[in-house]
Amino acid sequence: MSGRLMIRNATLPDGRVGVDLLLQDGRIAAVGAALPAPDGIETLDAAGWLLSPPFVDAHFHMDATLSYGLPRVNASGTLLEGIALWGELKPLLTQEALVERALAYCDWAVARGIGAIRSHVDVCDPRLLAVEALLQVRERVKPYLDLQLVAFPQDGVLRSPGALANLKRALDLGVDVVGGIPHFERTMADGAQSVKLLCELAAERGLRVDMHCDESDDPLSRHVETLAFETQRLGLQGRVTGSHLTSMHSMDNYYVSKLIPLLAEAQLHAVANPLINITLQGRHDSYPRRRGMTRVPELLAAGVNVAFGHDCVLDPWYSGGSGDMLEVASMGLHVAQMTGLAAMRQCFDAVTVNAARVLGLAGYSLEVGARADMVLLQARSPEEAIRLRAARLAVVRGGRIVARGVPATMTLDLPGRPSSVDFTRHPPR
Ligand code: FE2
């Protein structure tokens, strides 16, 4: 999919204003002020709104999405009932229904300005029904969405009979990334063993790793330490991600002061899932009730790349969501208390550039030579986009507009007041 498009008068996330971009052959051909327009080229007037590279969701479960209520709802709302409920649903799944739901979610994602998603896919079903369905979806959506798949042994690669063999079969079929869930194995020792063997498997096959790691309120769940160690031992620096890492919220501060530098040294990526962490963690607490999200500002300060993922939308674990990475960023901002100006921009990065680094996406920027993929938002700055969960005015893929939206507005009828309301403001930069 390619085309020629001139975008006029955009504001960029780094604060540049009045920027034109020429898109040609699926790439950004020129960036500057008052660019000359080739004859007959289609033009998109950005009208000073914020133009960003597309949102990237670094952590999702597309095999479960939009299944809320099947075969019943999660009564307790807990992670463990969600896993049990998913176990009840799995035998009832059909490939057609999986594909249909995944494609429907991908439509939502594109409409929300998402350009790439890393989705875990459960490999504990020996039929590999979900794997085959999502491989098919990955090909079908390729023209408009990058879908990266993680072979995820939901019930534990050691705990679930046949899971390791199934996981290898999934990789043979073309799944991109090796997953894991060490805290769900039977013992701490098995958890550590699972990290070791899965990292070795990834090293052998030249693949990236992304594990659900320490998704627990147990401060002694320390598998991320093993994940960082194996990353270093096998030379996988920069290719391994620890997802969730919620136990770090509850860990002893002294231990964390040793742990975070080890994660930075291993160039481990961290993915927090703010909407899900805030709703699933702390469930055994009375009050005060822990938030459960990992230590985002501290990880960032130590130089660890941190992204935010959506994780779930309308599935056994979460009854909300609509594919809006600005909602995810907003929740992350609030839960981590990242309200300073630089911190709010880091929250925008967590659903854009940082997430692209987790996936290893090439050509992800708004510079000349990069992919002509972007989203135009009804906001003047990244922090304003988060505050307003800004309307998507246009979504561009390969230099072609693939989705168009209208500005959010309301008509007022108030005595002595204007007839419309403008929620945008322009704070001094
Ligand atoms: Fe997850």
Image: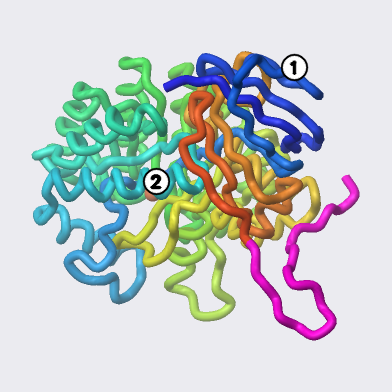
In the image: residue 58, left or right of residue 332: left
Q: Residues within 10 Å of mark 1 (few under 14, many from 20)?
A: few
Taking the image as shown, residue 201 lies to the left or right of residue 389, namely left
State the quadrant of the C terminus. Answer: top right
Q: Are marks 1 and 2 in contact (CB under 8 Å)?
A: no
Which residue is at 37% across, 31% downward? Answer: 148
Please say whether residue 189 is visible from this viewpoint: no
Instruction: State yes or no: residue 155 in magenta.
Output: no
Q: Residue at x 62, y 41 (%)?
A: 376
Q: Give coordinates of residue 174: x percent, y percent.
A: 25, 23
Quadrant the N terminus occupies: top left
Amino acid found under the numbered disc labelled 2: Phe
Query: Residue beneath label 1, please?
Result: 36
The span shown in magenta is 409-429
Q: Looking at the rendered structure, which numbered label has been put on residue 60?
A: 2
Name the amino acid type tagged 1.
Answer: Pro
Along the line of sight, which residue is nearer the eye, 27 or 389?
Answer: 27
Give the vertical position of 126 relative to 277 (above or below): above
Does residue 47 appear left or right of residue 179 in this picture? right
Residue 33 placed where, x, y %? Answer: 81, 24
**Element carrying mark 1:** loop
Q: Residue at x 28, y 41 (%)?
A: 121
**Residue 141 pos. (x, y %):** 33, 33
